Amino acid sequence: MDKSLQQFLLVARCQSISAAARMAGLSQPTVTSNLKKLEENLGVTLFERH
C-alpha cells in the first residue's frame, strides 16, 4: 500500500496528525506534507485542519 495512503488511514484512526506521526515513527511535518501531496494527487481535501 502507498505510504501516503497508509499515513492517511493512521491519521483517520488516531484523529490526530501528531499522534499518527508518533505511531509511525515520523515527524508531524513529514506526515502533513505527505497528506497534502495525497490531497493534491486526488484533487480533494481529506481532512479539515484546525
Image (cartoon, rainbow, N blue to C red):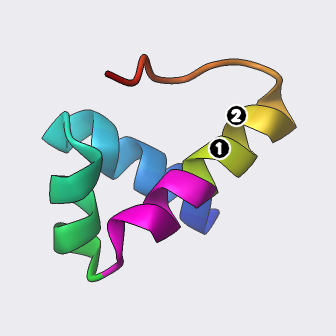
Residue 10 higher or lower than 23, as above or below: above
Residue 48 higher or lower than 21, as above or below: above
Residue 20 tag number:
none
Instruction: Tell whether position 30 is magenta.
Output: yes
Q: What secondary structure is marked by label 1?
A: helix
Q: Residue at x 59, y 57 (%)?
A: 33
Q: Please give the residue where the numbered disc 1 appears in the rendered image.
A: 36
Instruction: Tell whether position 38 is magenta.
Output: no
Q: Is residue 23 left or right of residue 43?
A: left
Magenta residues: mostly which secondary structure? Answer: helix
Q: Nearer the viewer, residue 44 or 28?
A: 28
Q: Position of residue 40 (x, y in %)?
A: 80, 36
Q: Residue at x 22, y 55 (%)?
A: 18
Q: Position of residue 35 (x, y in %)?
A: 57, 47
Q: Position of residue 39 (x, y in %)?
A: 70, 34
Q: Residue at x 65, y 44 (%)?
A: 36
Residue 41 higher or lower than 49, as above or below: below
How far apart marks 2 and 1 lie (CA) works out to: 5 Å
Q: Which residues are magenta?
A: 26-33
Residue lying at the far front in this picture: please name it. Answer: 50
| Screen quadrant of the C terminus | top left
Q: Please give the residue where the numbered disc 2 appears in the rendered image.
A: 39
Where, by quadrant of the figure, is residue 20 drawn? bottom left
Q: Is residue 42 left or right of residue 35?
A: right
